Image: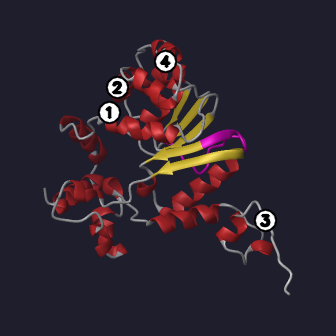
Amino acid sequence: MNWKVKANTLAVLSRMPGGRRLYHALQARLNARKKDDDNFLSREMIQAAAADPRGGKYLEIGTGWRPFVPFLLYLVGAEQIITYDANRWLNQAYALQTFAALATRAGLIAERLKLNVADLQKRVHAVGTPSDLEGFLRPMHIDYRCPADARSTGLPAQSMDFMVSSNVLAHIPPEILRGIHQEGFRLLKPGGLVAHRSNLDDHFSYVDSSITKANFLRFSEAQWRWYGGTGLGYHNRLRGVQHRRLLEGAVPVHPDFASFTPEEMAASYLWIVCKRPD
């Protein structure tokens, strides 16, 4: 498919009444959100294993269509998972399919994360199939907030152990990202961790092999606005260094230290060895 066909379709759907509902129906009909279970699961386990999730309180940015991250965190013993999304892509059918995919791989999860498989199986069997999405998520300690603004959560300061996201940052405008990072800094306990992973490629390259993964960098902001600068196909095109600057700007630094580089301020241990000149 020519990438501009998809880009133009998304642009039109974004601007027409009922376009988002139609987009949701088309995605389901075309199976565009099909599960790549084993590959996706291996990546999510690596992310979850960055620190011991057991007993932790998590804030997730961007629940999406397939909530692998919050489900996986529940299975490995997270105490609380609050997941925010601006658009309600998740429904009960997607949730049930995703959990079933993880449940059949309990042994693999336990092996990769060095957890007791019996404990994992116990958590799997503790989850029922109630008639609504919220009732399904509640026993897993998952609080799904959507539509909601992750820049203003209303949660107590220093109340969360982790802030995570999976392939979400590229789809959030920079000015909103800045606010999300600031809120994350406010919410994290001392020693709390942030773990984001994000695909910086031009996503249209996955449907059109004639363009590169950096094709979208050929366009000015004005040109890109129609193709992917707004609506359903939004991609901020931020490079890694720009994401780093947004994170650095979210952490308040006193003016007394403004002249130092981030590397200079990040040093937390020091050895001094001197030799007196002859």
Q: Where on the picture, by quarter, is residue 37? A: top left
Q: Position of residue 44 (x, y in %)?
A: 44, 39
Q: Nearer the viewer, mark 3 or mark 1?
A: 3
Q: Which residues are magenta?
A: 147-162
Q: Tell me the distance, in whole angstroms, between the alpha carbons under discs 4 and 3.
A: 45 Å
**Amino acid at circle 4:** Val
The residue that disc 3 covers is 271
The residue that disc 1 covers is 37
Left or right: 216 in relation to 146: left
Sequence order check: which comes first, mark 2 or mark 1? 1
The residue that disc 4 covers is 117
Q: Position of residue 199 (x, y in %)?
A: 38, 55
Q: Quadrant of the N terminus?
A: bottom left
The residue that disc 2 covers is 101
Q: Nearer the viewer, residue 156 or 106?
A: 106
**Amino acid at circle 2:** Ala
